[in-house]
Image (tube, helix red, strand yellow):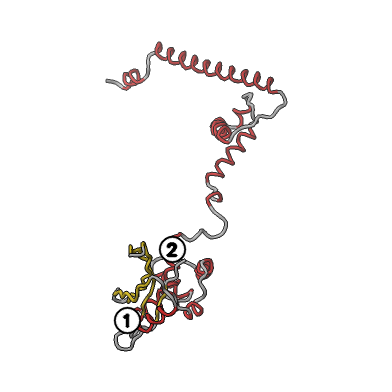
Amino acid sequence: MTSDSLVAVAQPSYPLRFVLVALAGWINQQQRSVVDYLQEENRALREQLGPGRLRFTHDQRRRLAAKAKTLGRHALRDIATIVTPDTLLSWHRRLIAQQYDGSARRGPGRPPVPAEIRALIMRMATENRTWGYTRIQGALANLDHAVGRGTIANILREHGLEPAPERAKKTTWTEFLRTHWDVLAAADFFNVDVWTGRGLTRFAVLFFIELSTRRVEIAGITAEPDAGWMSQVSRNVTDASDGFLTGKRYLIIVKNT
């Protein structure tokens, strides 16, 4: 097969070329007719609108700007648009700028410290009262948490915790109980209603509990607790030989309200 025959095969025949050209012209004419119609429709709408100004939503501006950028300024000038080409293209520039603008995602100042980190700072400060801001900052860094010294101070201040020298001077209730657990006891009353020969009688029961062993001692039961009865109970539980409170240094009295 010669090269001339190859060219003849590759190119469409004259009748086929005629059909393709005619089809392309028809499609172009259809598109031109659509554009002419839309232009005329826009003119009619603008005539009804009069001198009033159209208000576009953000989504409408975005859609118009995207289409306008595809056409270009010269093509837009040939179309009777409801918005000038300069306005359409300026919308498009703003949309592109907003895409790379991270200011809406940034809050004022530094980002807030997560709640779990704040809780960890509070725990470190309360469980280690001699730790200052720098010591807490170092402990957080060992756990891969970067928190500024001033931020730590602000968090502790918000929760009413003083700096380390002042915190170290005070004993928490938990520390007091842990330190004096073996010499602590507690006392309280409870009432019992009992049927007697005089009818239903309410008795007051005074009991003590040794906190380290949870051992309970009933110190006395009476229907009429008074100062004399309390004095006798006190002598019994503090007896040097077999009193329940022997060896105890602190007594916690529960106050019922």
Residue found at the far left of this picture? 1
Q: Nearer the viewer, residue 112 or 78?
A: 112
Q: Position of residue 217 (x, y in %)?
A: 31, 75
Q: In terms of sequence position, does the residue under pointer 2 or pointer 1 come before the other?
A: 2
| Relative vertical location of residue 232 with respect to residue 31 in this rendering, above or below | below
Q: Which residue is mark 1?
A: 244
Q: Nearer the viewer, residue 102 or 191?
A: 191
Q: Position of residue 119 (x, y in %)?
A: 44, 64
**Residue at 56% from the left image edge and 44% from the top image edge:** 98
Between the residue at mark 2 and the residue at mark 1, the CA separation in whole angstroms equals 47 Å
Q: Position of residue 83 (x, y in %)?
A: 64, 29
Q: Which residue is mark 2?
A: 117
**Residue at 58% from the left image edge and 40% from the top image edge:** 93
Mark seen at residue 108: none
Q: Is residue 229 left or right of residue 60?
A: left
Q: Position of residue 88 (x, y in %)?
A: 61, 34
Mark 2 vs mark 1: give the one in front. 1
**Residue at 64% from the left image edge and 35% from the top image edge:** 87
Alpha-carbon neighbours of circle 2 within 10 Å: few (<14), some, or many (≥20)?
some
Q: Nearer the viewer, residue 199 or 93?
A: 199
